[in-house]
Image (tube, grey):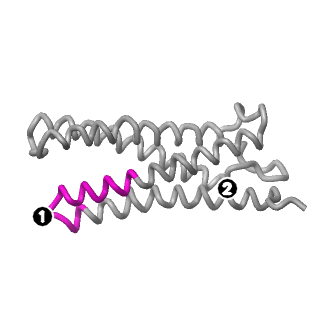
Amino acid sequence: MAILTCTRLMAVERLLLALWVGGICVVGYLVAPILFATLTDDRQLAGMLAGKMFSAISWAGLVIGTLLFVASIVGAGAQWLRQWRAWALLAMVVIVCVMLFVLQPMMAELKAQGPIIPGSDLAAAFGRLHGVSSVFYLVMSLLGLLLVAAGLRRSVSGEGVG
């Protein structure tokens, strides 16, 4: 008897997806706004704490997203190219990589140049990167919620969204 049956594997995949997308939503749309609303006197501390949480959920997403993407390819074989779910997972992993390895280091570099004073060129540059990051985060969140709602795989009877 196989240790990890197909049903159990699908349950693990659903659990991992739910944990990842739940983490994305909790960090980005609950915890970060609460930090900035609570720490009004120390926005730098709020930003540092939020940044650490965004980094943590990004690393978790890189691992979980890669595992789910590989599982979708293995499960679908050559047909993975025709499955929107696999493309959605790939897009989410690419977004995580851009945020982890491009945007977060660029934002950290700006912060290292000194205090970000509102109205300064540094603040404008940081604001642009923050805006780009926010759009990527929103897209990743929506793709994740779509996957949670639709499921990672077609139902066995062939019903559901393809």
Question: x%, y% of residue 135?
Answer: 38, 41
Residue at point 75% right, 57% down? 9
Which quadrant of the structure image shows residue 73?
Answer: top right
Residue 76 in the image: above or below residue 34: above
- Residue range highlighted in magenta: 36-55
Q: Earlier in the sequence, mark 1 or mark 2?
A: 2
Q: Give amino acid for label 2.
A: Glu
Residue at point 41% right, 46% down? 137
Circle 2 crowding by C-alpha within 10 Å: few under 14, some 14–19, many from 20: many
Circle 1 crowding by C-alpha within 10 Å: few under 14, some 14–19, many from 20: few
Residue at point 55% right, 48% down? 63
Residue 122 in the image: above or below residue 160: above
Question: x%, y% of residue 46?
Answer: 23, 60
Q: Which residue is mark 1?
A: 41
Q: Which residue is mark 2?
A: 13
Inspect the magenta stretch and tell me whether residue 40 lies in it: yes
Q: Give amino acid for label 1.
A: Asp
Quick one: 141 or 162, which is closer to the camera? 141
Q: Residue furthest bottom?
A: 38
**In screen coordinates, is 47 left or right of 94?**
left
**In screen coordinates, is 81 left or right of 41?**
right
**In screen coordinates, is 135 left or right of 113?**
right
Quick one: 76 or 51, which is closer to the camera? 51
Q: Secondary structure at mark 1?
A: loop
Question: x%, y% of residue 132?
Answer: 33, 38
